Image: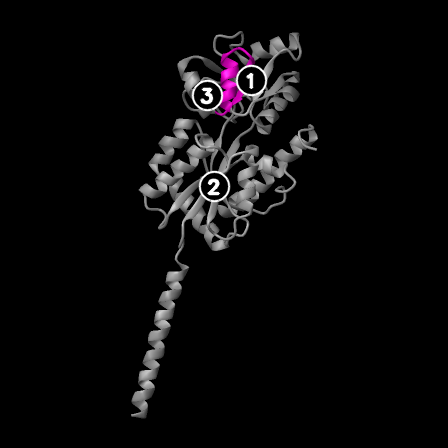
Amino acid sequence: MRKAGIMIIAMALIASNVFAAGQGEKKAKYPEKPVEFVVPASPGGGSDILARLILDIIQKNNLVDGNIVVVNKGGGGGTVGMAYLASQPGDYSIMTMNAAQALAGRATPALGKTEFSYLANLAMDNVLFVAKADGPYKTFKDAVDAIKQNPESISVGVADNLDQLCVIQINEGVGTKFNTVYFDSAGEIATALLGGHIQLGIFNPNECIGQVQAGTMVALGAFSNERLDPPFQAVPTFAEMGYPGIEFQMFRSIMGSPKMSPEVQKYWSDVMKKVVATDQWKTSYIKKNGLEEKFMPVEEYGPYHMKTTERLYTMGKNIGLFK
């Protein structure tokens, strides 16, 4: 009888342990609650489109066993969204990020040293130097000849500090004095350019692809290291035109809150790797918007992000963009 009692107690303990283990596994399942997908920009912009495309791919392919909610936090060139993400605890907030937003955050004292969780780089966006198609500048040489004959007579529309850095690269590399005029968005630059209020503009391919295809804008030069896909295949790189030092690409990536656990960082890195492997991503984002595929997992992207952002910040500081 005593042995039987001991056996019953032992079996009860084993059952209890199995139940507890099962409960532990259930508790460890991620995500247990909705995940916020923060967009540091207003609805309808490039960052918002990116987030919603990623969400669509995740849902269609069942890549995440849980709910994801897009939350727009626009303003301050991305710093409002970054400040919001910095205030979020734990593992339930991720955010789209690009080089311009990262630079704005680095230049903001309250955010500059925040240690966010850098999850994955998704792609590289290119930059173009663009003119009005029926204007006087058909080639980059036309614009250079004109500005050298009449310094500071030509204005270039820019939407952020990275655009400004691109113009400065041209001025320093070519010996020109193009003026810059700040606008709130690429859409405003396009309106001013087509209206004749400025002569040139800095655009990402997806920001001017419609106008180029329609024949209202023409790209004079690409900051990429090789020629882009159609409809920009005829646009020469600055290196081809004799200016190898004029080159720039913008990273587009995903990051998480500062206190995100290493396990969850790896989780989202793996999810994003699956996202960029889909045909929908390749056709509806990369090809459609003229981007380059460049995935970096969490362990690679973190060092790259910090090194690149610091380099851009130093460049901006050296030319007086930041105090």
Q: Which residues are magenta?
A: 186-204
86 magenta-colored = no
Q: Which mark is residue 208?
A: 3
Q: Quadrant of the C terminus?
A: top right
Q: Which mark is residue 241?
A: 1
Label 2, label 3: how far apart the Cα atoms are? 26 Å
User: For numbered disc 3, what is the local secondary structure?
Assistant: helix
Q: Are marks 1 and 3 in contact (CB under 8 Å)?
A: no
Across and down, in percent, residue 314 comes to 66, 34
User: For numbered disc 1, what is the local secondary structure?
Assistant: loop
- Residue, x 58% and y 47% (percent of image)? 115
Across and down, in percent, residue 182 comes to 59, 22
- Residue, x 55% and y 21% (percent of image)? 238
Name which residue type carries label 2. Answer: Val
Across and down, in percent, residue 88 comes to 52, 49
**Residue 33 visible in the displayed image:** yes
Label 1, label 2: how far apart the Cα atoms are? 40 Å
Along the polypeptide, which appears first: circle 2 or circle 3?
A: 2
Q: Is residue 169 above or below residue 69?
A: above
Q: Is residue 279 above or below residue 137?
A: below
Picture mark count: 3
Q: Are marks 2 and 3 in contact (CB under 8 Å)?
A: no
Label 1, label 3: how far apart the Cα atoms are? 22 Å
Task: Tell me the residue that label 2 is attached to.
Answer: 38
**Badge 3 density bin: few <14, some 14–19, many ≥20, Cα 10 Å:** many
- Residue, x 36% and y 78% (percent of image)? 13
- Residue, x 56% and y 28% (percent of image)? 248
Q: Quadrant of the N terminus?
A: bottom left
User: For numbered disc 2, what is the local secondary structure?
Assistant: strand
In this view, the mark in front (1 or 2): 2
Name which residue type carries label 1. Answer: Met
Q: Are marks 1 and 2 in contact (CB under 8 Å)?
A: no
